[in-house]
Image (tube, helix red, strand yellow):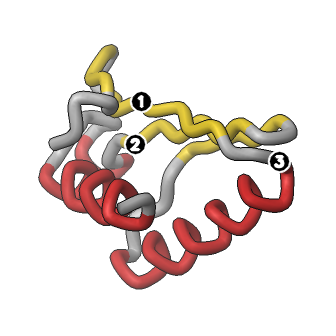
Amino acid sequence: MSALWLEKNNQLHRSFEFKNFQEAFAFMVRVAFLAEKQNHHPNWSNVYNRVDIVLCTHDADNTVTERDYKLAKAIDKLLE
């Protein structure tokens, strides 16, 4: 797991910054396809060039599970 993900309050958190809104939104689209493929959807927000993602498993009483780590790792790979 990337050291850039922070686990707190039974959630994984990470913020991403991009050059502009277009790059941030393109990243969100790529994450959306990953999430749909894994049937595991993030809580997220976007303001201009910043995307904040929060992961937890709703089916497991909103705690962090292997599904969250798997999606976080896949998201990290998008930036390699």
Q: Crowding near pointer 2: few (<14 within 10 Å), some, many (20+)? A: many
Which residue occupies 31% across, 16% down?
Answer: 8
Q: Which residue is mark 3?
A: 20
User: 46 or 61: nearer the eye?
Assistant: 46
Please report contact status of discs 2 and 3: CB closer than 8 Å, yes or no. Answer: no
Q: Residue 67: x and y, percent?
A: 22, 58
Q: Position of residue 38 (x, y in %)?
A: 34, 76
Q: Earlier in the sequence, mark 3 or mark 1?
A: 1
Q: Nearer the viewer, mark 1 or mark 2?
A: 1
Name the spot of residue 18 as percent of width and height, x first.
68, 45
Mark 2 or mark 3: whose residue is earlier in sequence: 3
Quadrant showing the N terminus: top left
In this picture, residue 23 sits left or right of residue 30: right
Instruction: For mark 2, give the secondary structure.
Output: strand
Say which residue appears at 78% left-offset and 41% top-offset. Answer: 49
Query: In 3D space, how far apart are the residues under numbered discs 2 and 3 (Cα atoms)?
Result: 24 Å
Q: Residue at point 53% right, 40% down? A: 53
Of residues 52 and 27, the one nearer the viewer is: 27
Residue type at numbered disc 3:
Asn
- Under mark 2, the amino acid is Leu
* Left or right: where 8 falls relative to 15: left
Q: Quick one: SS at disc 1?
A: strand
Left/right of residue 28 with respect to residue 79 in the rendered view = right
Q: Specify the quadrant that holds the C terminus.
A: bottom left
Q: Residue at label 2?
A: 55
Give the quarter of the image for residue 76.
Answer: bottom left
> As shown in the figure, which amino acid type bears the numbered disc 1?
His
Which residue carries the number 1 mark?
13
From what the image shows, is residue 50 above or below residue 9?
below
The residues bearing labels 1 and 2 have C-alpha atoms spaced at a distance of 7 Å
